[in-house]
C-alpha cells in the first residue's frame, strides 16, 4: 500500500516520504511529558508574642532582630514558603509598670518589621482589658495549623514557639502523615516539642543555648549567629 501511494504521489509531482505516510496512517506518537519538579509548600506558624518576649530577654527592652533576618536564619534549615504570625499588642493596662510603655513602642516596631516581610500573614489577637493578658492567640494558631493540614494547604509545617502547650496540634498534624518541624530561640526551647517534631533547630543568638546537660534529639540543629543585626 505504501508503494502504491508513493507511485501515485510521484506521478502527480507530490513529494511524500514513508514517514509522512506512517504518521498519517497511525498518527503521531505522543511525546513523553517530562516530570516537573513540584516545589513543596512549607508553612511556618509563629507564636509571635512568645518570640518577642524571648528577644526581650536576650537583647533587653530597646532592641530586637528584624523579622526578615530571623526568617533568613530559619531558611538556612527549612525552605519556608509562607509564614503565619500570631501576636497581640500591649494595651494601656500593661503600662503601669516602669518601662512598659517604651517596651510597647519596640514591640510595635518589631511587629511592623513582621508585616513588611514578604509572604507573611499577620494575625492580630487581643488582650483582656482588665488584666492585659493575651487571649486566644495560641488557640488560633493551633486551629489554623490543623485546619490547613486537613485542607491540604501545605506539604510540611514548622512551628516556632517555646510553649509546650502547642504540642497537641503538632501531634494531630503528624498523625495525618505530614512532617512537622520546630524552631526555637535559645532561651525559649521546649525539649518536649523538639522530640515530638520530625526535626528541630535552635537559633543560637548570643550563644545562649544551654542544652549541653540535656538529652537532646539527634535531629536537632544549632544555628549559630555570631552577631545578629539589632
Image (spheres, rainbow, N blue to C red):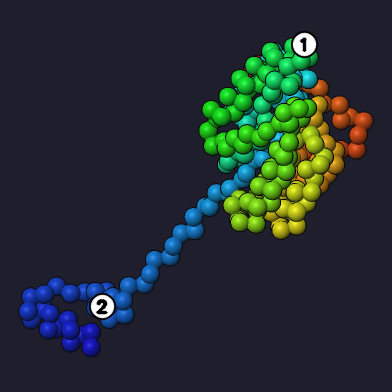
Q: Residue at x 72, y 28 (%)?
A: 129
Image quadrant where one finds the N terminus? bottom left
Q: Residue at x 85, y 38 (%)?
A: 191
Residue at label 1? 98
| Element type at mark 2 | helix
In the rendered image, the residue lying farthest to the right is 213
Residue 108, visible in the rendered structure: yes
Q: Residue at x 74, y 12 (%)?
A: 99
Disc on res. 24: 2
**Location of residue 74 by image quarter:** top right
**C-alpha distance separating marks 2 and 1:** 87 Å
Could you say where residue 86 lies in the image, as x and y percent from the top left?
66, 36
Of residue 87 and residue 186, the one placed in the foreground of this image is 87
Could you say where residue 187 lies in the image, as x and y percent from the top left?
81, 26
Classify mark 2: residues with Cα within 10 Å, few (<14), some (14-19) or many (20+): few
Image quadrant where one finds the C terminus? top right
Amino acid at each position: 500500500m505504501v508503494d502504491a501511494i508513493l507511485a501515485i504521489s510521484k506521478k502527480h509531482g507530490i513529494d511524500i516520504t514513508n514517514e509522512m505516510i506512517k504518521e498519517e496512517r497511525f498518527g503521531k506518537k505522543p511525546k513523553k511529558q517530562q516530570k516537573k519538579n513540584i516545589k513543596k509548600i512549607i508553612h511556618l506558624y509563629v507564636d509571635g508574642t512568645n518570640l518577642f518576649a524571648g528577644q526581650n530577654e536576650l537583647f533587653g527592652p530597646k532592641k530586637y532582630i528584624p523579622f526578615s533576618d530571623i526568617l533568613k536564619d530559619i531558611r538556612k534549615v527549612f525552605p519556608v514558603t509562607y509564614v503565619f504570625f500570631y501576636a497581640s499588642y500591649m494595651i494601656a493596662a500593661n503600662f503601669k509598670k516602669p518601662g512598659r510603655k517604651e517596651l510597647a513602642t519596640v514591640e510595635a516596631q518589631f511587629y511592623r518589621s513582621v508585616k513588611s516581610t514578604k509572604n507573611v500573614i499577620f494575625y492580630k489577637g487581643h488582650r483582656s482589658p482588665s488584666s492585659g493578658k493575651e487571649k486566644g492567640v495560641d488557640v488560633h494558631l493551633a486551629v489554623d495549623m490543623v485546619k490547613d493540614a486537613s485542607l491540604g494547604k501545605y506539604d510540611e509545617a514548622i512551628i516556632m514557639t517555646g510553649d509546650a502547650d502547642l504540642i497537641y496540634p503538632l501531634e494531630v498534624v503528624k498523625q495525618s502523615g505530614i512532617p512537622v518541624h520546630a524552631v526555637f530561640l535559645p532561651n525559649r526551647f521546649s525539649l518536649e516539642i523538639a522530640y515530638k517534631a520530625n526535626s528541630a533547630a535552635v537559633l543560637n543568638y548570643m550563644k545562649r543555648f544551654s542544652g549541653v546537660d540535656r538529652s537532646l534529639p539527634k535531629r536537632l540543629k544549632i544555628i549559630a549567629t555570631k552577631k545578629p543585626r539589632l
